[in-house]
Amino acid sequence: MDFIDLKAQQQRIRPRIEANIQAVLDHGQYVMGPEIFELERRLAEYCGVRHAVSCASGTDALILSLMAYGVGPGDAVFTTPFTFVATAEAVRLLGATPVFVDIDPATFNMAPEALETAVSAVAACSGDLTPRGILPVDLFGLPADYAPIQAVARKYGLFILEDAAQSFGAEYHGRKAGALGEIAATSFFPAKPLGAYGDGGMCFTDDDGLAEALRSLRIHGMGADKYDNVRIGINGRMDTIQAAILLAKFEIFPEELERRQKVAARYARGLTGVTVPTVPEGSLSAWAPYSVLAADSNHRTMLQARLKEAGIPTAVYYPIPLHLQTAYKSHDCAPGDFPVTEDAAARIFSLPMHPYLPPEDQERIMQIIVGSPAKE
Ligand SMILES: *Cc1c(COP(=O)(O)O)cnc(C)c1O
């Protein structure tokens, strides 16, 4: 059994993928070819935003977005410690400071009340940090709670950069992930809801000025003329071949998203003995990945071992919260600082989740979990 079965998807659309790759080989525009602009047009339309700017990875999408705001030393960017390292890494690479905010225990996303507390503390402190932006993560494919986050952003004059790396296709009160901040960053790493055959990413925004800056920054800060560099940028372009592959995959993406909902609903109906994910009213998750909470860390170890014996792969996202990672530790952070995050990190694990998971396989997974309750 696969944790994510990319072969089943490929079998369905292989002729289309091959034809799209062939077209790139024929026209030979490997860098910034027509498929790049076609993909940007389609995904901007899908997300309901004016601009989509493709780039080399989700990490680059975060870096480019922060660069477009001119984030740098002395700036505080508020995010959660319960995320993939790239979220905070992008902030640190630019010399700014990630300020961590604990999560909501039901959704694993940034807790808006904790955000307000953290922002007001930094704003009140006469230190050398200035609140600049909020970087909420749509963890496991579920959008963060943007309405109260927006209220904090407005109150303190902060930008919102949505880390939508896991949530492409998700929704929050009628709006698509990618359209929930002033700017959003997504990833096309193969295991994400919409995955390429290599690395890729995209920024989304309605702001014309930010979009222009992003397009310049991804090509070494070029101006109107390619050899007139008006900013310090990076080589952050997406390969044309990846755009061609994504165009083929995007055709079946809406249907795949529906299949993911069915798989998630079957898990939610059948699982007992673990806490299944909560989807708040008005939200739709892209389910990447499907994560449940065991009773405690011993229970998690037992469940993962029993599933492994049966040939069922599982994973832990994320075993070490960012505030306890070697590279991100600071004197102001210690174990116990973010109790909700630390509790989740000790108990969480993820089950196989992809659009082609056969119901029989899912039954097997659920039987093992239901039959392995925590010891009293
Ligand atoms: C995957 C991921 C990223 C980085 O995307 P890459 O394409 O791998 O660079 C950033 N943030 C989160 C939350 C992710 O899951």
Image: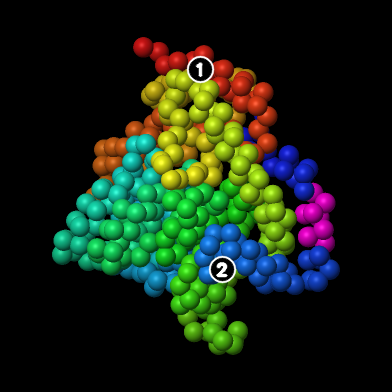
Identified by mark 1, the residue type is: Val
Query: Left or right of 160: which side holds 361?
Result: right
Q: Residue at x 68, y 57 (%)?
A: 246
Crowd band around label 2 with a 10 angstrom C-alpha radius: few (<14), some (14–19), many (20+): many
Q: Residue 195's spot in the image, x, y percent?
A: 63, 51
Residue, disc 1: 370
The answer to whether any part of residue 229 appears in the image is yes
Crowd band around label 1 with a 10 angstrom C-alpha radius: few (<14), some (14–19), many (20+): some
In the rendered view, tell whether residue 25 sits above or below residue 372: below
Q: Quadrant of the C terminus?
A: top left
The answer to whether any part of residue 64 appears in the image is no
Range drawn in magenta: 14-22
Q: Residue 76's spot in the image, x, y percent?
A: 30, 62
Which dot marks residue 53?
2
Q: Residue at x 56, y 55 (%)?
A: 187
Q: Residue 321 in magenta?
A: no
Determine whether the beta carbon of the residue marked 2 sits less than 8 angstroms from the nearest atom of ligand 1: no
Which dot marks residue 236?
none
Q: Quadrant of the N terminus?
A: top right
Q: Nearer the viewer, residue 282 or 68?
A: 282
Specify the principal SS of the magenta part: helix
Query: Left or right of 133: which side holds 126?
Result: left
Q: Residue at x 54, y 28 (%)?
A: 267
**What kind of element bears circle 1?**
helix
Q: Residue 147's spot in the image, x, y percent?
A: 34, 54
